[in-house]
Image (cartoon, rainbow, N blue to C red):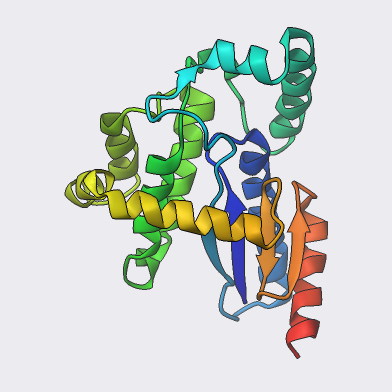
Amino acid sequence: MNIDIISDVVCPWCFVGKRQIEAALALYAQERAGEDRPRVSWRPFQLNPQLPPEGMSRQDYVLKKFGAARAKDVYARVTAVGAEYGIAFAFDKIERQPNTLAAHSLIALAGAAPADAGGLQDRVKEALLQAYFLEGVDLSKAENLIKVAAAAGLDPLQAERCLADPASRQAVESEDQRARAIGVQGVPFFIFNGKVAVSGAQGPQALLDAMHQAETALA
């Protein structure tokens, strides 16, 4: 089974969704002991494509997007849900809201490794989510992106070349536009075997049910 997950590294619900698909995959593996694990591919989506490459103040971004009162409620809810999945969101540590084109280009680079080098793309995705949401790392800075990706196993020289290559970012932009063209308006967005789609962080059982539906549709 192939699972395409469209998401952004600055979307807290995408972090929750990652934990939910991991739980769903564990349930799937219990049902099918000894079978091949579904292949997960992380696809790009920019929540804020209008942001400049250097990003902007997180405080200014939150006030503009939500307003102070609503932001408090939004983050309280996602923090509570995140805790259920072992994610200790530290929103107070985030000082910059980044443009995520560069981060997505490194995730794509990791996914292009031969046979995905044993889950390299997933590790890079995880590392970027943790760096941003748990440590408040400024993902608008190339040196930070390279450091985070390298710690996850991506070759730092390849990462540096990727970030310097305009074609890498153009490829991300093109894939982002394809996602919007098929109707993706919010993330996370899961596509199972190209047949069944689930929008939002719906929970492990809902994702497992979608896997079953996709298998039936494929048959």
Q: Considering only vertical position in the picture, is 64 above or below 107?
A: above
Q: Residue at x 48, y 14 (%)?
A: 95
- Work out whether residue 178 or residue 117 is closer to the camera in this orientation and state it: 178
Image side of residue 85 versus residue 69, left or right: left
Can residue 71 be seen here? yes
Q: Considering only vertical position in the picture, is 5 above or below 60?
A: below
Q: Considering only vertical position in the picture, is 146 above or below 83?
A: below
Residue 50: x and y, percent?
A: 52, 33
For the image shown, how many numbered marks are present on the structure?
0
Q: Residue at x 68, y 63 (%)?
A: 182
Q: Quadrant of the N terminus?
A: bottom right
Image side of residue 168 versus residue 92, left or right: left
Residue 115: x and y, percent?
A: 37, 72
Residue 65: x and y, percent?
A: 68, 21
Q: Residue at x 32, y 65 (%)?
A: 113
Residue 199: x and y, percent?
A: 76, 53
Q: Quadrant of the C terminus?
A: bottom right
- Work out whether residue 3 or residue 22 is closer to the camera in this orientation and state it: 3
**Residue 11 image-quadrant placement:** top right
**Residue 28 image-quadrant placement:** bottom right
Can residue 26 be seen here? no
Q: Considering only vertical position in the picture, is 212 above or below 129?
A: below
From this viewpoint, which residue is outermost toward the left?
157
